[in-house]
Image: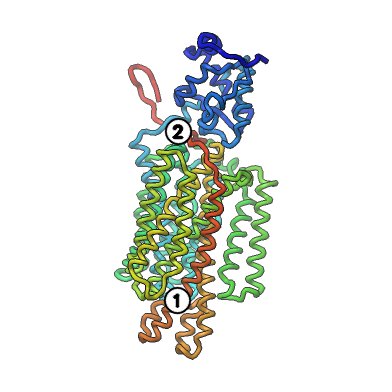
Amino acid sequence: MVPEKDVTQEEESATVPSQTPTTQDSLNLRSSAASSSNDTTTIAPRTGDFPEADSTLTGLRLDDPSSSLSEKFPEYQNRSGIGSRGSDDTGNTAIAKVAADANVSPTPPPTVAPEEQQEELPKKRKAIIVLTLCICVFLAALDQTIITTAIPIIAAQFDSATGYTWIGSSYLLTSAAFLPAWGKLSDIWGRKPVLLSAAIIFLIGSILCAAAQNLGMLLAGRVVQGLGAGGQLGLVNVTISDLIAVRERGVYLSYVGLTWAFASAIGPVLGGVFTEKVTWRLCFWINVPIAVLAMISLICFLHLQSPKITVKDGLKRVDWLGITLVASGTVLFLLGLEFGGVSHPWNSPIVICFVVFGILILCAFVYVEWKVAKLPIMPIKLFTNRTNACAYFVGFFHGFIFIAGCYFIPLYFQAVRGDTALMAGVYVLPYVLVLSFVSAISGAIIARTGRYQEVIWAGTTIMTLGTGLIIDLNRTSSWSRLAIYQIILGIGCGPLFQSPLIAIQANINYHNVGTATATFAFLRTLGTALAICIGLVVFQNSMQVQSDNLAGRLPANVLVAISGNEAASSVGFVQGLPAAERAVAQDVYARGVRDMWFFFLAVSVACLLCSLGIRRHHLSRVVNSSQPAKVRRKKVEGEERV
């Protein structure tokens, strides 16, 4: 061990000749060796990405492990963007190992060179690919909200009171249940073929819904749609993560959030227009040409270095047990919540069995992913880090609040204010337009500053404020109050589309990006499904209690119409009542909606508390991916270069 001492500039040059390519290459190879032996912290293998680090290395004694990297440049250990962050001691240990080993073999690793993995796409091609991916998100998000203003009409046409719940929740339930599987399938067979498969399934489901002749056929189509939508929602963010450095992902993921918000904004309006002016079936036919266009664009422009594996070998690597458990557990649990207090009493055997067995199966899923599965679809280790766990729960709870605004604010306008489906879609625009604008702005802020922690804190705080203000709405609330409350809620929800995901991706190894991103999408989609199920249960139970207390004040047929599971589908019936009876019924609806938003306020508070556990990590500008884009090669002055 060489004791630490002052080193002159001449001695530094003699110790580490920074201008000598051979020495620099040796250092790079040693860094690669250190990363393979310790996957906690790794160093970017390319010279020139971090000039401040390159210049400071000339003053670091490689034969003196006591020279601490953090003393020279404390942020360098988190600049690679490859390994997980969060342990300064591990980073210094890796550097000490590199410095102490003076005889590392210069044999390059047999894998793809890091320089090739880090090559970026041309801006034009990148823009086309991101636009195509946003179209996929647009379709999946549009079908979450386009039917919100059409559901009362559809439920009435098929003469089904339960249709209000199932038309929306069947789509989200299937999307959430199978979403984790899509991420792992894309790891096995590649992003492009799996994403195309999801788009095809979504297209088939849209056609089934558009051609439905009864409620059963419509629900079957919604299930198929949800299966494909889960793949699109999960794999779009994964694909963007393969193409874009984590520092820049805030901008591109904000485009995805903007698209989602725009689809959410235009969905209720389109649904209202189609339902009132043409037919509700157009809500599903509109997907067909857009989906075909997106698939053609994916085929032509999205070229990734997919894994080379046969179908037989790929099937062996699929975690079939995990997929079965998470899908069945999610479905049973949500079915129990759907039935409880509405179709069946909460203490009925069917509700108890569904809820209990759903929870038990999900617990079995956690055990299988933790102890049994060789290639789990949802590695439990993702939740062992505090930042990751808190970010996942922020995304989960944000799904509750976001979809509540899209689903239940239109219900307020129709049931409490007496507006048409079209105008209900128009009146919710302040919420979704502000949400989309703030989502884009927050992504740009993260990309420019590299700070996401403060963005998340601000979003959860304002979202909680907005959720609490919505509780104040009633039948006579002024239009200024309606607009301001929606704007505040939109400002809070907007930043939380991409910022929790960036926090997760900044804290994991790039080989786990696909699984981690799919897990995030699963939890958010599960949150949206639970929000609709639980929100409607709270609303319907509140309506049931109030209708029981109104005996004698309203006719018997009106009490039946606004009670329990009949309430949501009886909005049109209530508007045809005499003025005095209509006012009483609308006040009942207002209290039902208020009780539902008390539940969402509790969820928003939980989201705020979880956000406090998120730590800040450095966002690298280096593109690292397990399935990088294929960059065309061309001749330049007689030399071939990428």
Q: For numbered disc 2, what is the local secondary structure?
A: loop
Is residue 484 left or right of 173 when viewed as pictured?
left
Please tell me which residue is depicted at 45% across the width and 26% down the height of the picture: 49
Tag shown at residue 589:
1
**Residue 38 position by quadrant:** top right
Tag 1 or tag 2, which sits nearer the N-term?
A: 1
Instruction: Write the residue at 47% across / 38% down.
Output: 246
Residue shown at the point (50%, 60%) measured from the top left = 400
Tell me: residue 433, above or below residue 149.
above
Is residue 41 at all visible to an observer of this figure? yes
Alpha carbon separation for disc pair 2 and 1: 51 Å
Q: Quadrant of the N terminus?
A: top right
List x then y, in percent, for residue 523.
Answer: 54, 53
* Residue type at tag 1: Tyr
Q: Position of residue 339 (x, y in %)?
A: 57, 71
Which residue carries the number 2 mark?
621
